[in-house]
Amino acid sequence: MTDNEDGETKETKEKKRKEERMARVQYTDWTVPVAQVGSHAGQQMPLDRTFPAPSGIGDSIVGIKEGADVHVDGQFDSIVDGLIFTGTFTAPVHAVCSRCDTPLNDDWSERVTAFFPYEEQQTEPKGGKGGEQDDDVEIIAGEDEAEDVYPLMDNGSFADLEALIRDTFVDALPLQPLCRPDCKGLCPQCGVDLNEHPDHHHETTDIRFAGLEALKAQLEAAEGDADGDVPAGEN
């Protein structure tokens, strides 16, 4: 029994539609199916899963190694125009104290709230003055856009967390990590850790007065020579 003149059954057509949909979506390690929760406003979908850390989070001083485990614990909540994700990202951060070079490797957790709107439907501008009105709408929409907005894919069927994970940690990691707020750093002359040796110091001479010190020594030496040349009977 066929459904059309080409001899396609319902199952065949559904399979083709599924294959076409899968071809449109670029699946990655960070792709999350959310079609079920997005079907009606007011639904929730918990997410407790580990993702690989994307590239570009920090550097050799402070950052997260690409591919490291990032644990995501949160939930998607559906609203009329998209999904709200709230949760916590936890990942191993490598860092070095910017003052004393002490390694600071530890797990780092960040609270996250992000909006995943449905893809906007493209509409033709309505003639006449409608074009000007559309321009105004685009300007207003641009002003409302926030950095923590990540559009859904394939008519709201999938969310991709790669950019959200990267943006969250890039914004959170410190530019100059410290082992503690009052870190004393290293001795600039010999490199001793001043946190472990707070009384460490070097006897130094201010080089700005080095020339005067040399002149003083010459004068004192000249006076000593003059005193030694005085005949004994004249004392």
Image (cartoon, rainbow, N blue to C red):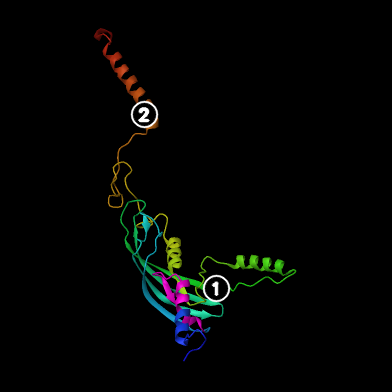
Tell me if residue 190 comes above or below residue 170 in the rendering.
above
Q: Secondary structure at mark 1?
A: loop
| Outermost residue, left side | 232
Of the numbered discs 1 and 2, the one sitting upstream in the chain is 1
Numbered mark located on residue 194 in the image = none
| Crowd class of label 2 (few under 14; some 14 to 19; many from 20; radius 10 Å) | few
Q: Could you say where residue 6 lies in the image, as x and y percent from the top left?
A: 50, 84
Is 134 on the left-hand or right-hand side of 220?
Answer: right
Tag 1 residue: 119
Q: Is residue 75 above or below residue 56?
A: below
Amino acid at the residue labelled 1: Glu
Q: What residue range appears in magenta? A: 18-39
Name above or below for residue 18 compared with residue 29: below
What residue is at 43 percent from the left and 67 percent from the top?
Answer: 162
Which numbered disc covers residue 210? 2
Distance from label 1 to label 2 (Cα)? 73 Å
Q: Could one spot residue 36 in this view of the protein?
A: no
Left or right? Give the position of 29 relative to 190: right
> Image quadrant for the C terminus?
top left
